[in-house]
Image (tube, rainbow, N blue to C red):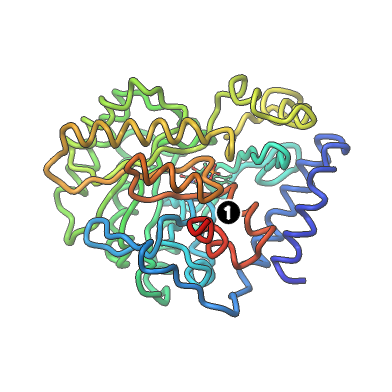
Amino acid sequence: MKAATLAKLESLARPFSTRLPPRAVVRKYSEGRLDFLTKLGEETPSEFYSPPEEFSRELWGIRFRGPVMNAAGMFKNGECYEMTAKQGAAGYIGGTGTWNSRHGNEKDGIYLPFAPYARSHAASNWLGLPNDGDHANSERARTMKRVADCPIGWSVAGPPDLQGEEMLRRLVTGMRLYESAGVDFLEMNESCPNTGQGTPNYDELGTRLRYVKDNFLDIRTRRLPVIVKFSVDTELPQVPSLMDMLFELGFDGVNFGNTSTQYARRRATIHPDERKLYDFYTIGDFGVGGGVSGRPLKEDSLALAGRAVEYFKAGPPSQEFHVIRTGGVESWRDVEQSERAGVSLNQWYTGYFEMFAKHGHGVYRKLLAGAAR
Ligand SMILES: Cc1cc2nc3c(=O)[nH]c(=O)nc-3n(C[C@H](O)[C@H](O)[C@H](O)COP(=O)(O)O)c2cc1C
């Protein structure tokens, strides 16, 4: 069965899954997600869709074919570049990668626990940065067959199992591997909720970012933009000081943002029929917490990215700087709102898979067709 057919059948069944016991749903969808991704990785779309020229844009001298690309964590080991490029993605991001390979989280015999909330257009995950490590993945990045104007980025993080200077050294070692592999940009994941990160602690964040400046940014061997991805739980008043830090240290952009751990607040946007599963996963018997993704993040990602643009415009740094929005992007209307707010690029995850379930490999064509209406 093709990935698109599988996704469609599964999406039809999803709304009824709330009738099953929550543990059974998490087990079924955690396993199903992995099977589906394997299937997806084996496919390439028969058609090549290139977005109309009017959607393309240039950031840091790099051309992106459109306004939307995948978010980090979708293709952790460099899978599916050719597939997303053929679908019409603006660009591609692999990872999050860490210097060492990581197995990822497991709870009660459920590997990489995931919970879908179909009626809420949302999901929870607690994966813990599973990946094959920066050595293996940078080699994959090096050999990817490039598609024009679909640049390749990589999301990187300090290995959460290491501490202090050792962790920072490994982070920068990984960044150098991707630099020499020829990737077009890097994104530092400063916001994974599933490894003990989350909303930034200024002192630790400042130390990490300064280390990256001294040991990577200042000695880059070519123009390689580095952006920093924060949580969508970042408070609006924190934006100016975060931006000042990025400006001063020479970073090239910011991404708002990563999944949410504000479970009580996001619960209001979860459909009443799905709250039992939501509670079970986040704070109840299963209780892994994890990160909430999808529609519940839409307003905050727009507000944070919009505030970042406003602040940037009031006093731009000397380097070219861009604001990226991630969180709850699922339709052309969302993209339009981002464009109006001055956001340079969008990334999507939950919305992508929902759209894929409906339209298969026509996912970007369908999204961008919204512009004509
Ligand atoms: C299953 C899953 C795995 C994710 N893994 C990562 C990751 O490895 N690195 C990262 O920066 N973000 C990761 N994210 C967060 C997404 O990149 C994105 O920031 C978040 O899901 C919000 O976007 P969305 O509302 O479009 O899903 C993950 C999200 C999901 C659902």
Extreme residue toward the bottom, this view = 46
Residue at position x 68%, y 23% in the image: 283
How crowded pointer 1 is (Cα within 10 Å; few <14, some 14-19, many 20+) is rated as: many
Please state which of residues 14 and 184 is positioned toward the viewer in this rendering: 14
Q: What residue type is labelled 1?
A: Tyr
Extreme residue toward the left, this view = 318
Residue 161 falls left or right of residue 41: left
What kind of element bears circle 1?
Answer: helix
Above or below, 216 relative to 211: below
What residue would you read off at disc 1? 352
Residue 54 point in image, percent of width and height:
36, 64
Q: In which quarter of the image is residue 201?
A: top left
In the rendered image, the quadrant that contains the N terminus is: bottom right
Q: Count the marks: how many?
A: 1
Residue 134 falls left or right of residue 79: left
Residue 161 point in image, percent of width and height:
46, 39
Residue 2 falls left or right of residue 40: right
Above or below, 199 relative to 19: above
Residue 110 point in image, percent of width and height:
73, 43
Q: Quadrant of residue 214?
A: top left
Ligand 1 near label 1 (Cβ, under 8 Å)?
A: yes
Residue at position x 52%, y 36% in the image: 298
Residue 188 point in image, percent of width and height:
36, 45
Please state which of residues 246 and 339 is positioned toward the viewer in this rendering: 339
Residue at position x 68%, y 56% in the image: 34
Q: Quadrant of residue 313?
A: top left
Please state which of residues 365 and 371 is positioned toward the viewer in this rendering: 371
